């Protein structure tokens, strides 16, 4: 079995899909691993480190991909990026399938089996494969670091001979994996932290981290979580009540970090332009949902803007990858954990069980067609 690790073709992507740690494990399973020269450079991994654990260093993508049975990527590759792979080869990547059916069909025509790692079910068996969690955890951490860098004051209360410096007030909107890590990081830096989410189960988690929970806790709030653990789309009436509470709270905050996302939908707008106007000069908003439209009405992907009233709105994209070495290490472990379930230990070859719940949840393309039930209707 031959495994290929090509360089990412997006110039702004510094992560790599395998590390020397996971390459060594794949070789231990009987695979030959081909890594494109320079694939790990932006994650501070030299070619020599891959070679030292037994990888073959390929001079270019074509050489790395030639006759590959399994291709490991960070982002969904373009069809032209898959020249030379075997028919039926498995490609593991963050596939971004929502609203990209044409791109998925183009990949399908290469007759590869494309697996979307972000569709991994949230079950106990798959926790170690959950790329959304591993990368969101880092994004939540980095959001606080970026906020601290943009904020013109310190986070902790300081008692000095020159007087007392008050602690920063930090509000986290959306308490998933990213939000929880943001709470923990902001608390470590000495901030006074509050948080909100529409899911009732998050209240206990927020309080356990030493933060205060802010939400309209009515009957709709009690039912606002899917069986998969994601937030539901709330009614306009609830959104209005929550917006009123949020607006009054926002005006008192120094730092706001938004993380609210609903799979397959645009990010909900949690902070309106009028809310931004109510905030103090020098306060900071970090919008982690900016790539899906943004939780703040004024945020712009890839930009940091300062409003007329002096509010700094940070719209960094691909935030997890702002610490690429750590992000790559975690992502590579996620991929290995899933790939290991696709490899027959006796024959040392790919053996994909279409009945496996992990395969059914993540397999997008097979035999030249788009096969995932959630995307077939819009692919017609």
Image (cartoon, rainbow, N blue to C red):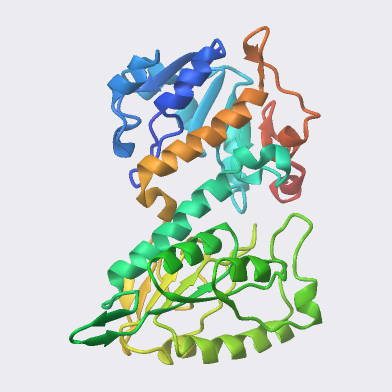
Compared with 138, 282 (above or below) is below
Instruction: Please report the residue visible at 56 percent of the width from the left and 42 percent of the height from the top.
Output: 95
Q: Is residue 216 left or right of residue 253?
A: right
Q: Which residue is farthest top?
A: 347
Q: Quadrant of residue 141?
A: bottom left
Q: How many marks?
A: 0
Instruction: Please report the residue visible at 61 percent of the width from the left and 71 percent of the height from the top.
Output: 207
Q: Quadrant of residue 169?
A: bottom left
Quadrant of the snapshot with the N terminus: top right
Whether residue 323 is visible: yes
Across and down, in percent, residue 313 comes to 37, 75
Compared with 24, 255 (above or below) is below
Across and down, in percent, residue 107 comes to 57, 34
Q: Is residue 373 left or right of residue 107?
A: right
Q: Which residue is farthest left?
A: 162
Q: Is residue 68 left or right of residue 370?
A: left
Residue in front for this viewpoint, 182 or 227: 182
Q: Which residue is farthest front?
A: 161
Instruction: Please report the residue visible at 32 percent of the width from the left and 75 percent of the height from the top.
Output: 305
Across and down, in percent, residue 50 comes to 36, 21
Instruction: Please report the residue visible at 55 percent of the width from the left and 28 percent of the height from the top.
Output: 336
Residue in front for this viewpoint, 313 or 256: 256
Whether residue 10 is visible: no
Across and down, in percent, residue 94 comes to 54, 42
């Amino acid at each position: 079995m031959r495994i290929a690790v090509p360089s990412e073709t997006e110039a702004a992507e510094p992560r790599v899909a395998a590390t020397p740690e996971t390459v060594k494990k794949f070789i231990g399973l009987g695979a030959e691993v081909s890594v494109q020269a320079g694939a790990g450079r932006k994650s501070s991994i030299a070619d020599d480190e891959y070679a030292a654990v037994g990888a073959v260093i390929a001079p270019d993508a074509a050489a790395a991909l030639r006759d590959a049975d399994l291709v490991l990527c960070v982002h969904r590759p373009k069809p032209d990026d898959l020249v030379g792979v075997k028919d039926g080869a498995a490609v593991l990547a963050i596939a971004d399938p929502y609203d990209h059916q044409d791109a998925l069909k183009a990949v399908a025509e290469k007759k590869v089996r494309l697996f979307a790692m972000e569709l991994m079910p949230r079950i106990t068996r798959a926790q170690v494969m959950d790329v959304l969690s591993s990368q969101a955890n880092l994004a939540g951490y980095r959001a606080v670091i970026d906020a601290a860098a943009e904020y013109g004051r310190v986070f902790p209360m300081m008692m000095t001979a020159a007087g007392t410096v008050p602690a920063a007030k930090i509000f986290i909107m959306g308490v998933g994996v990213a939000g929880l890590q943001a709470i923990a990081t902001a608390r470590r830096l000495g901030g006074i932290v509050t948080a909100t989410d529409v899911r009732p189960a998050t209240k206990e988690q927020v309080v356990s981290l030493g933060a205060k929970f802010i939400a309209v806790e009515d009957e709709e709030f009690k039912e606002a979580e899917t069986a998969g653990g994601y937030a539901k789309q709330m009614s306009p009436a609830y959104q209005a009540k929550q917006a009123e509470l949020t607006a009054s709270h926002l005006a008192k905050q120094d730092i706001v970090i938004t993380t609210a996302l609903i799979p397959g939908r645009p990010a909900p707008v949690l902070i309106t332009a009028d809310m931004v106007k109510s905030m103090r000069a020098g306060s900071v908003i970090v919008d982690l949902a900016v790539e899906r439209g943004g939780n703040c009405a004024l945020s712009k992907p890839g930009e940091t803007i300062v409003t007329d009233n002096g509010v700094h709105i940070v719209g960094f994209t691909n935030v997890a990858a702002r610490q690429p070495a750590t992000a790559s290490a975690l992502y590579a472990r996620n991929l290995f954990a899933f790939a290991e379930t696709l490899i027959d230990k006796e024959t040392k070859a790919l053996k994909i069980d279409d009945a496996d719940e992990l395969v059914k949840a993540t397999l997008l393309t097979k035999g030249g067609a788009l096969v995932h039930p959630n995307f077939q209707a819009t692919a017609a």
